[in-house]
Image: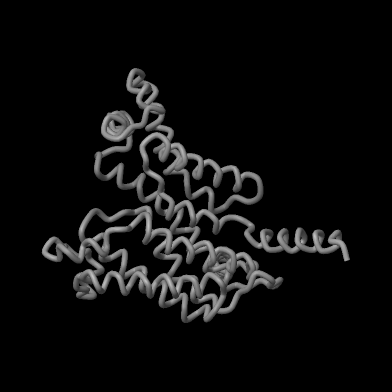
Amino acid sequence: MARRMSALARAGSAVSGWWFKPMPLARVAVLRTLVYLFLIFDMLYVATDVVPHGYVPELYQPTLVARILQLPTLGVTGGQVLFWVVTLASVCAAIGAFQRAAGWVAGLGFWLWMLNSQGFSYVSHDHMALMVAVLVLPTVGVARFGDTGSSERVGWVLRVVQVFTILTYFGSAISKWTRSGTPWVWANGAVFVWAIMRRGSDLIRWTLDFPWLLIVGQWALLLLEFCSPVVLFLRGKWLYALVATFVLFHLATYLALGIHFLPTVVCWAAFLPLERIPAWLRRRIGRRSEVAPA
């Protein structure tokens, strides 16, 4: 019994250490800036339909969360006001002003924006990790580019963003499985053919003459998605190589099909040593100051 309890204690300690591993404050400070600036970009160029939805409120079909919260349509004026509230809060959070308060306003406002957007169309799973990120980032509190310390709270926030980034892919693989009956039914189907015929660019349409190549691609994608949780346990060059693989995959889908997945791509930054960016900038500025003429 004592050995079993000791083993359970070690396992619990390992799990806790994985979730709450201290990570640099500067890393989350950079990630926070990237995420909050992207919210503005997202509202301007990705989820751009909230204000236009105000003209057709009768088409509103709220998602489960919106139904639970009994969220009404925003209307044209409501959408415009919400845009500026989220924009101003995002700018404040990105530059480190009123970090916690601005983060909560931006995060909750963006949730309201996305719930309205998706209440009129399909639920875009490429936003999942981003929407989780804006909820957990304010819990860090004050974190600045110049901070040299680490924090378990930062580790937890980064880990949550990482997990939900990976769940975007693993969940997609599970969805392919459940909707098709078996994974190989999807992998051996004509999904890529349909996608290329519907929206393929000239860069990819030539593959329609080689259906076997598209089957290979479908198997490769399915295996990549099923194996995506491995990323959570890698370090160093192997980690960066797989992060680059997923980012390049999204670049390829954008060039081939016009599908970008930018909200998820931004969240891949949670896997990177972002704290090196401020340090590198300080060194560059310091060197220029040293060589500048008196």
Q: Residue at x 55, y 78 (%)?
A: 97
- Measuring from the top left, give residue 40's x and y in whole percent: 42, 63
- Measuring from the top left, give residue 71's x and y in whole percent: 22, 73
Q: Residue at x 57, y 56 (%)?
A: 271
When asked about the image quadrant of residue 72, the answer is bottom left
Residue found farthest to the left: 58
In this picture, is 192 found above or below 273? above
Residue 157 falls left or right of residue 39: right
* Image quadrant occupied by the C terminus: bottom right
Whether residue 189 can be seen here: no
- Measuring from the top left, give residue 139's x and y in whole percent: 50, 76
In this picture, is 41 found above or below 188? below
When asked about the image quadrant of residue 134, the answer is bottom left
Whether residue 193 can be seen here: yes
Viewer-nearest residue: 83 or 217: 83
Q: Residue at x 60, y 47 (%)?
A: 240
